[in-house]
Image (cartoon, rainbow, N blue to C red):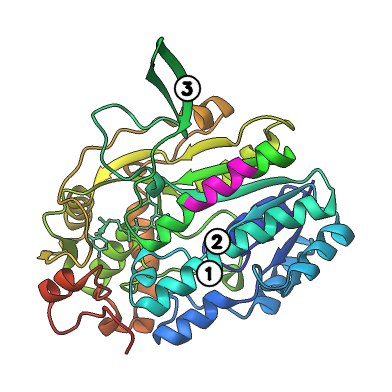
Amino acid sequence: MRVLVLGGDGFCGWPTALHLSARGHDVAIVDNLSRRGIDQELGVQSLTPIPPLPQRLAAWEEVSGRRIDHVDLTLGRDFDELVELFDTWAPDAVIHFAEQRAAPYSMKSAHHKRYTVNNNINATHDVLAAIVESRRDIHLAHLGTMGVYGYGTAGAPIPEGYLQVTLDTPTGSAQREILYPSDPGSIYHMTKTQDQLLFQFYVKNDKLRITDLHQGIVWGAQTAETRLDLRLVNRFDYDGDYGTVLNRFLIQAALGHPLTVHGTGGQTRAFINIQDTVRCIELALHNPPQRGDRVAILNQMTETRRVLELAQMVSRLTGAKIAYLPNPRQEAEANELKVCNDRFLALGLSPITLADGLLNEIAENARAFSERVDVSKIPCVSAWNAERAAAIGPLAVHAAE
Ligand code: USQ
């Protein structure tokens, strides 16, 4: 299969590109390196030293004998170039990771909200319009988020994208299948709910083949391929904007920093290990929808956990202390969360769970690079609104500086 990985230099894009290349697919990465630019803007670096993309790609060719090309193109802006790329490179599938993916970054200021909306929604729309323009039967697999559903349920498990509803009509009742009602918790998550409508429209109007993968919070950073050579190492974000909760707890423990639990830690979220992420994407590529099918929506997660439960797990392993901090986010203090993930299980996913003992290995790897950490970048200072800014105090960032 010929696969274009949009955003292939990023946290999930890079290991996905390697995983698919290792399995014999022809892969090219489309990336404008904006994520590296954001590191500079924030004054942080990945815990792991990630070489420039040309060096990464040269290392992959050396290690695997397989070539991955890089196309430097800005999605949402360079539309004609994108159409030309689809024409000349002739992908069978396009995987779309090219969105700004950090909720705290998207809430820092009006500038960051606008950047996230402009980047994400225009990128997604340009990919869809370019597929139509190219007249090719390209399967689009998009990285969505569990956050489109919100995290509150009425006790019922969150289905895979669609909800059966019964409507009262003047003559009785009617059954409908609707997209599960969106309830985003940040501007970032909101852009992914908008993506869903774009997909629904393009499937209806142009019969595009689209898979939307609603992914949970990723933990771990390395996969079988990124472990092959230090130059292939994946990025590991620990800072208050891009670091995800469990990876942050692991590096905090390695540094002897208290584990930064927001509020009571009663928030329940869905999780997935990065190795399962790349496996799920491969499964999705091998099982695309047919022309005329509705958008295929799969919940790409393997377990749900409370934030406090994760902190306690890391604390037990490492002896780290737990700090209960005022929450910079506008979110429920506690919630129950049940999620259906039957579709990936039916396709053969055998989940890696937190119980598999990988946490120690990640903590040890984190310790190896701990001298690269800037401890001042650990606190989450991006406040969701003025009230949350007041709660977290003088460090809060809530408007353009
Ligand atoms: N949290 C803490 N302490 C921390 C960091 C986070 O208690 O030091 C809490 C947050 O308040 C939140 C939860 O942990 O309640 C999850 O935060 P997170 O930063 O790990 O994850 P989130 O912002 O939801 O976003 C991440 C990815 C995003 C993806 C999403 C999947 O950055 O790209 O879409 O996970 S999901 O959460 O299922 O929507």
Is the Cβ of the residue at disc 2 closer than 8 Å to that at disc 1? yes
Residues 144 and 11: in front is 144
Label 2 CB less than 8 angstroms from ligand 1: no
Q: Taking 2 as reference, is 308 left or right?
A: left
Image quadrant in which you'd find residue 77: bottom right
Q: Nearer the viewer, mark 2 or mark 3?
A: 3
Q: Sequence order check: which comes first, mark 2 or mark 3?
A: 2
Image quadrant in which you'd find residue 335: top left
Q: Position of residue 227 (x, y in %)?
A: 56, 61
Q: Quadrant of ligand 1?
A: bottom left
Image quadrant in which you'd find residue 186: bottom left
Asked if residue 195 is among those painted magenta in the image, a careful observer would answer yes
Q: Taking 207 as reference, is 144 left or right?
A: left
Q: Identify which residue is drawn at 23% across, 75% down.
A: 379
Is the residue 380 above or below the residue 144 in the image?
A: below
Q: Which residue is mark 3?
A: 176
Give the amino acid type for the residue marked by disc 1 in the picture. Answer: Asn
Give the amino acid type for the residue marked by disc 2 in the picture. Answer: Ile
Q: Which residue is mark 2?
A: 121
- Magenta residues, as a range? 194-201
Q: Which residue is mark 1?
A: 118
Few, some or many residues within 10 Å of mark 3 (<14, 14–19, 20+):
few
Q: Position of residue 266 (x, y in %)?
A: 16, 48
Furthest residue in direction front, as rendered: 170
The quadrant in which the C terminus is found is bottom left
Q: Position of residue 292 (x, y in %)?
A: 71, 30
Few, some or many residues within 10 Å of mark 2 (<14, 14–19, 20+):
many
Q: CA distance from mark 2 to mark 3?
A: 27 Å
Is the Cβ of the residue at disc 1 closer than 8 Å to that at disc 3? no
Q: Position of residue 370 (x, y in %)?
A: 34, 77
